[in-house]
Amino acid sequence: EAGVAQSPRYKIIEKRQSVAFWCNPISGHATLYWYQQILGQGPKLLIQFQNNGVVDDSQLPKDRFSAERLKGVDSTLKIQPAKLEDSAVYLCASRSLREDTQYFGPGTRLTVL
Amino acid sequence: AQSVSQHNHHVILSEAASLELGCNYSYGGTVNLFWYVQYPGQHLQLLLKYFSGDPLVKGIKGFEAEFIKSKFSFNLRKPSVQWSDTAEYFCAVSGNTGGFKTIFGAGTRLFVKA
């Protein structure tokens, strides 16, 4: 079974630029999560989808972050415009409705200069 | 507020030493508890989980954790660590009162000296 795929693995941008991350969950997993992990901290949930609907986006900075999962499969997370404090690893995870275990992708390390 | 506290940010042990990593949580209602591990250069993966039943949970690679409800704790243990256990360990909690949102602790970096 293929795992959660994410791209790119690394991204360096300047502040005020835009960036997008892509995630392809494990096949058949209805629930998809985006987390932000700042250095020295644990992952923090940004947004949770179930199929193509948003379940929780209470911690998503909506003035600059957006995410979509239009067909209920893969998802994109966008930051526009980026700030220095957005430097972090962005993790995608997916979960089957039959269990409460999340499976994580390798993450995208974003550096904002 | 829902939160997870991991007692140690960095732990250094010699091979064959015993390990115990502390985790306390604040989360109302019924909880599910997890320990995730991130080996150098690899992604987060599940080490073990507790949903219900026996509060002593055994996971992969000889790890175990004990859920003590009265102390809101879920400490991770291993009787004898190996160099290959060098990694970062995250405690996490989810539950029905939070819509099963998972809250992670800040992590503990374990370094095992050969």
Image (spheres, rainbow, N blue to C red):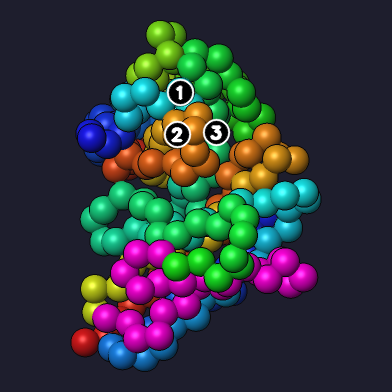
Mark 2 or mark 3: whose residue is earlier in sequence: 3
For disc 1, the marked residue is A30
Please indicate, yes or no, whether residue B17 appears anywhere in the rendered image: yes
Amino acid carrying label 3: it is: Leu
- Identify the image quadrant of residue B74: bottom right
**Quadrant in which the C terminus of chain A is drawn:** top left
Chain of the residue under the numbered disc 2 shown in the image: A
**Residue at horizontal 63 percent and vertical 39 percent from the top:** B100
Q: On the rendered structure, is B98 left or right of B62?
A: right
The stretch of residues the image draws in magenta is: B59-82
Amino acid carrying label 1: it is: Ala
For disc 3, the marked residue is A46
The location of residue B112, given as percent across then percent down, is 30, 81
**Residue at horizontal 23 percent and vertical 35 percent from the top:** A1
Q: Are marks 2 and 1 in contact (CB under 8 Å)?
A: yes
**In the image shown, does A32 or A35 lie closer to the viewer?**
A32
Q: On the rendered structure, is A23 left or right of A95?
A: left
Magenta stretch: includes residue B24: no
- Whether marks 2 and 3 lie on the same chain: yes
For disc 2, the marked residue is A95
Disc 1 on helix, strand or loop?
loop
For disc 2, the neighbor class at 10 Å (few under 14, some 14 to 19, many from 20) is many
Q: Nearer the viewer, mark 2 or mark 3?
A: 2
For disc 3, the neighbor class at 10 Å (few under 14, some 14 to 19, many from 20) is many
Q: Which residue occupies the extreme top position in the image?
A: A71
**In the image shown, does A24 or A98 lie closer to the viewer?**
A98
